[in-house]
Amino acid sequence: MNIVEFAIAFIILVILPVIGLYKLFEKARRPGWEAIVPVYNWYVMLKLSGRPVWWILLMFVPGINILVGIGILVDFLKSYGKFSLGEQAGGILLEFIYLPKWGFDQETKYIGPSASEYFKEKYQKGLKKSPAREWTEAIIFAVVAATLIRTFFIEAYVIPSGSMESTLLVGDYLFVSKVNYGPRIPMTPVAFPFAQHTMPLIGTKSYSDIIKLPYCRLPGFSDVKKGDVVVFNYPMEADSPFNRPVDKRENYIKRCQATPGDTLSIRNAQVYINGKAMPNPPQSQPSFVVQTDGTPINPQILTDLHIFIARQISPAGYEMLMTRQSAATLKGYSNIKSVKEYFEPKGMFNPEEFPHDPHLRWNTDNYGPIIIPKKGWTVKLDSSTFPVYRRAIQVYENNRLEIDGNDIVINGKKTNTYTFKQNYYWMMGDNRHNSEDSRFWGFVPEDHIVGKALFIWMSTDSNASFLNSIRWSRIFTGIR
């Protein structure tokens, strides 16, 4: 995302809510600076509302943390006299508006810990409910509010693999905006909240096929642009054994390299769009062949430079994945004889590459040219184009496709052309030699687009000790 988009998102999602909390904390005679400290501000909100402080631990449990976070905020708002459903919904869905508004409002005052019996007796006597009903209503409200936020506004996402390193690291927690490209209306609306496709623990489907809605997207701020880091549903889960609906397929995150109508080619790992070389991601990790003098490389050096050994190719030679900055640094060590960037040679066929056709002789580093389908574009179908576009025509656009001798039959009619019904995109990981992306499974249809990655709000390193597990330098950083 560019600096303007990052600044707008950061102001809306972080600065304005923190300003509101700052002023509200002061109303309760707490230092305003406590609102600025992540995690600690949850502790203060729990103290002010009278809830147990151990609830903070629940904020680190995926799925549960959404409900608990909403519950903490609702109790906090009640402590300032915000009892109505409208006020609580506004404080949750539009906290960047309502928290500052109430923080600067002279009429809004801290009136006590809302979870205490004294508070309930004094301020909510006429609204007094049994504990069971209170908890039930709180959970239902939290689920509904969290579902609305997750569906139409913003969703938290954690990086599970290294395909985007070093731009995004395993353990980075992102905010993904649904409004940038327009929120997608759920196509499988009957589903268990917060479970993408599988129920936790029991492993059954988390959704029902009873109701299926056609693809529809509300207006957004922009279209998907080249260079955007995008979350989308994994297209290959349309196939057996998964056979999942579009919006229940696994979420992937990659960088958009080509948009509808573009011609993409890759030459020696350099991506070209419409004949023009595209900027390489600043933290991408190409593959290098490293020759040593036989002396082992200090493992700490590999850790510090964030270098991954892909394979050992000789007693003193290795294929390694690293940034170009790390490669330049590695060359300076006395036991390193050479560091050279590695490419799969042109003309060498890799059967794993889409569309898996030996006549095309494409591989990871030398690929294409290939035209990305655009809505309304008519392609002539022949021996060179049919293998490339067959899956989009048959699977993503739901046509009955048959081959009758040398004839192509679509929906019972013989034809040698096809006009696409939707736009498509080409997605690739920044870690080019450790990424399963469009080079392996092809185009990403428009109806698979989930949202745009905005910024990192938390980052943890599972390989570090508990005290050093948080990567503080990555918190609240934008994604380039």
Image (spheres, rainbow, N blue to C red):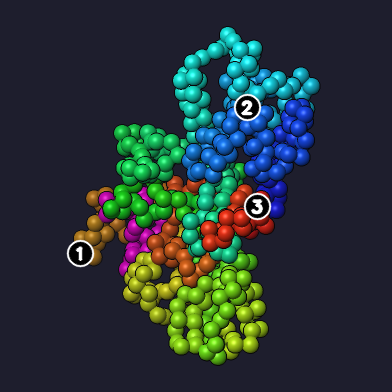
Q: Nearer the viewer, residue 111 or 440?
A: 111
For disc 3, the marked residue is 475
- Chain-order first, disc 2 or disc 1: 2
Kindly indicate whether the residue at mark 1 contacts the one at mark 3 (C-beta within 8 angstroms): no
Residue type highlighted by circle 2: Gly
State which region is magenta.
376-401
State the image quarter where residue 33 is shown.
Answer: top right
CA distance for labels 3 and 1: 59 Å
Residue type highlighted by circle 3: Ile
Q: Residues within 10 Å of mark 2 (few under 14, many from 20)?
A: some
- As drawn, the residue found furthest toward the left would be 405
Q: Does the magenta segment cover residue 393? A: yes
For disc 1, the marked residue is 405
State the image quarter where residue 473 is shown.
Answer: bottom right
Q: Does the magenta segment cover residue 245? A: no
Looking at the picture, how far across and down is residue 64, in whole percent?
49, 38
Q: Residue at x 52, y 30 (%)?
A: 142
Looking at the picture, how far across and down is residue 261, in whole percent?
50, 58
Residue type highlighted by circle 1: Gly
Residue 162 vs 25, above or below: the answer is: below
Q: Nearer the viewer, mark 2 or mark 3?
A: 2
Q: Quadrant of the C terminus?
A: bottom right
Horizontal side of 156 relative to 113 (left or right) equals left
State the image quarter where residue 273 is shown.
Answer: bottom right
- Chain-order first, disc 2 or disc 3: 2
Q: Nearer the viewer, mark 2 or mark 1?
A: 2
For disc 2, the marked residue is 50
Q: Nearer the viewer, residue 109 or 417?
A: 109
